[in-house]
Every structure is written in C-alpha cells, then in structure tokens.
Amino acid sequence: MLNIYDSCDLLLRLKEFVDRQRRFLFLILSLIWGIEMARILIVDDAKFMRTLVKDALVPKGHEIVGEAENGNIAIEMYKKFKPDLVTMDITMREKDGIQAAEEILQMDSSAKIIMVTALGQENLLTKAIKLGVKDFVVKPFPPERLQKAAEKALNG
C-alpha cells in the first residue's frame, strides 16, 4: 500500500509522462498537418493571469517554457529559453513590460512579443507598438482573442 508521499510522487511522474506524450503528439500533428507549436514565455505579476494565459495557449499545442513575475526575470528567462513568443503584462513592479520588451527587442530584434494590458493604458500600448511588439490583448480577454494574437504574431 502506498503512503501519501509515494502517491504524490507517482501522480507527479504520471503528469510528467502525460505532458511528454501530449508534446510528442502535438509534434507529430504539426509535422502532418502543419499545426504551429510554439515555445512560449508568460510574463505577468499576477499568478492567476499567468494561469489564464497558459490555459488559453496550451490546448492549442503550445509549450510554456517559463513564467516570470517581473521584467527582470523575463529578460533572464528569454536569454535562457529563447522562446518563440512572449506574452508580456505592461504594469509590473520591478521592471515593467515596456522596459522588458525594449531590452528583449534590443537583444533580439526578431523577438515576438504580445502585450497583455488593462483598459486605460493606451499611451503605454502605443509606446510598445512603436518598440516593435507584434500585438496586444486587453484584460479581461476571451481565450480565442489571445489564441488569435499568438497565431498572428507567430505567423506574421
């Protein structure tokens, strides 16, 4: 009989196995049907928003390679993982999304960044677009809006 710790370990291993199988299946589908599977970095200071972004993009076959809660961590994770796409909140404490996007785009001019913003941040959004971000999504957003923005950024 398994104790609680063994049960938790077994569940974690099972989840990792299922995640690997899902990624493998999406890879096969992308080869067969041309489905775009991207490696994505999610940047937002609110965990629940990172979860909403993840829940919108993972079902489309994308892999979340990292999550960052501020711009400083986002820049380090971008260097480490070289994601295909970054979703970036504008307003964060340590380093905001505009500053982080600017640094990432200076490092890699081909970086694909989608800004995720609240209403009333039009002036910051204009600055982000001028920097070279690919699109923006206004919070709260339906999953389809974020999926379309990701598709546009990845294919455009």
Image: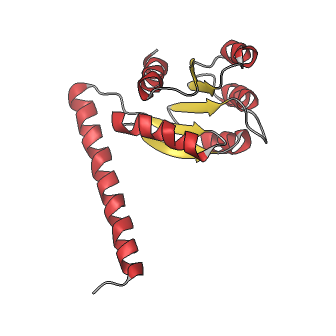
Residue 77 screen position, x and y as percent: 62, 44
Residue 44 screen position, x and y as percent: 63, 39
Quarter of the image holding residue 86? top right
Q: In percent of the image, x 34 and y 59: which residue is there?
A: 15
Q: How many marks?
A: 0
| Left or right of residue 79: residue 60 | left
Q: How is the image coloured?
A: secondary structure
Query: Quadrant of the image for the N terminus?
Result: bottom left
Out of 117 and 68, give the one closest to the viewer: 117
Quarter of the image holding residue 50? top right
Q: In percent of the image, x 49 and y 20: which residue is there?
A: 153
Out of 100 and 11, give the one closest to the viewer: 11
Residue 35 screen position, x and y as percent: 30, 27
Asked if residue 119 can be seen in this view, the reply is yes
Residue 145 screen position, x and y as percent: 46, 22
Is residue 127 placed above or below 108 in the rendered structure? Answer: above
Asked if residue 82 can be seen in this view, the reply is no
Point out the residue furthest to the right here: 94
Q: In percent of the image, x 46 and y 14: which residue is there?
A: 156
Point out the residue furthest to the left here: 32
Is residue 99 placed above or below 133 in the rendered structure? Answer: below
Is residue 141 placed above or below 21 in the rendered structure? Answer: above
| Left or right of residue 120: residue 145 | left
